[in-house]
Image (cartoon, helix red, strand yellow):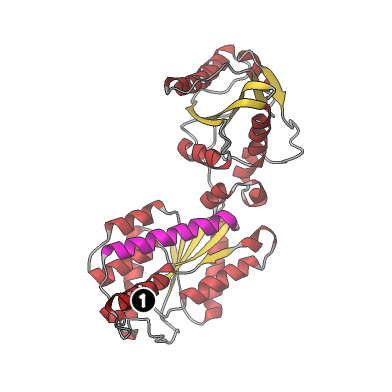
Amino acid sequence: MTYAHGLVIGKFYPPHAGHHHLIDVAAASCARVSVVVAASSVESIPLALRTAWLRETHEQPHVEIVPVVDDVEIDYESDEIWSAHVAAFRAGLAMRSGLGVPVPPVDAVFSSEAYGPELAERFSAVHVPVDPPRDRFPVSGTAIRDDPVQNWEFLAPAVRAYLARRVVLVGAESTGTTTLARALAAHYAERGGVWAATRWVPEYGRTFTEEKLAAARRASGDPSLWLDDLVWESADFTRIAEHHAALEDAAARSGSPLLVCDTDAFATAVWHERYLGAPGPEVEAVHERTPHHLWILTSPEGIPFEQDGWRDGESIRSWMSGRFEEELQKRGLPHITVTGPHEHRLAAAVAATDDLLTKGWTFNTPLTP
């Protein structure tokens, strides 16, 4: 190794391919690398999340990701402000020493920024420039915040999962949610480019029910058991919500800026009420921590009921649709209701989704010089 302790400092707001290249170059040249994630409290992506993303991508044992809150203003002409920034960085590194992790003096600073030489001098270290013109990865945090779609290729899977806009199809049984979810995802995939990877996530609750019935038949030795014989518990709905959320995250990590979901934890909470007669706090908790951006409610209007042997029945369909509408309104969740034939539903869903994507992404402005 050329250097004992290399230092990389950045906001990583959010991390992108250029950042990862910078860290990898440092890792190949140093016995130890400290990556300081210097985040200000005005920024809208939490420091803990950025730290976790970098740790996931950089698993090299000699690379340490160090979170630091740095709310000092930025003025590259001020010695006092420079000193305050460096003091914050050193405090973050010293924290590692306080935890029993020996931290040797920094002898190399890796950077693609114009301030790199000054930063290195203040650490009494060598400055190692890494692709200052950004020829290899023509991207920046500012460019991504301005237009994530155009820079999607430069984002790691975890960041894609965080930024993907998630549209959810919800509705009572036999109202066309699955058909519309497939068609909506296919519509965007057909646009090509970054949208070609648009995916949809099937409803896990149906799979869980099939598995639960099969397990009950095996346990009882009675192959004639059917849905009415099953005993539902709150834990069943929690498992459905958690597993479906995990499937969403996995799909979002490898997909386009849009993810289409056939149901979600919100819908599972409504079904929890339907079967158990009470809210499910643990299911609600899954809903609260899983981001979604638009709900599309499929009305039973214009859709003949089809009994495939797994459904409650037509009599409850209108009531369930009403409960979805009530809950969407009460919770203030952004939603539309689609009615009529499939073509009309798809056109309305595309229009609402286009509107969501046109609004884009909102990031708080970071501290700038």
Quadrant showing the C terminus: top right
| In the image: residue 284, left or right of residue 59 | left
Q: Which residue is drawn at 55% across and 12% down?
A: 80
Is residue 266 visible from the viewing direction of this image?
Answer: no
Q: Where is residue 167 in the image (x, y as percent from the top left)?
A: 49, 62
Q: Where is residue 88 in the image (x, y as percent from the top left)?
A: 50, 20
Q: Where is residue 172 in the image (x, y as percent from the top left)?
A: 38, 75
Residue extending furthest left? 277
Say above or below: 332 vs 155: below
Specify the segment rendered in magenta. 234-255
Q: Residue at x 29, y 80 (%)?
A: 221
Q: Which of 231 and 314 is in front in this view?
A: 231
Residue carrying label 1: 214
- Neighbourhood count class around disc 1 (C-alpha, 10 Å): few under 14, some 14–19, many 20 upward: some
Say above or below: 70 vs 347: above
| In the image: residue 25, left or right of residue 179 | right
Name the chief secondary structure element in magenta.
helix
Say above or below: 70 vs 158: above
Q: Nearer the viewer, residue 311 or 294?
A: 311
Q: In which quarter of the image is residue 105?
A: top right
Q: What residue type is labelled 1?
A: Ala
Is residue 131 visible from the viewing direction of this image?
Answer: yes
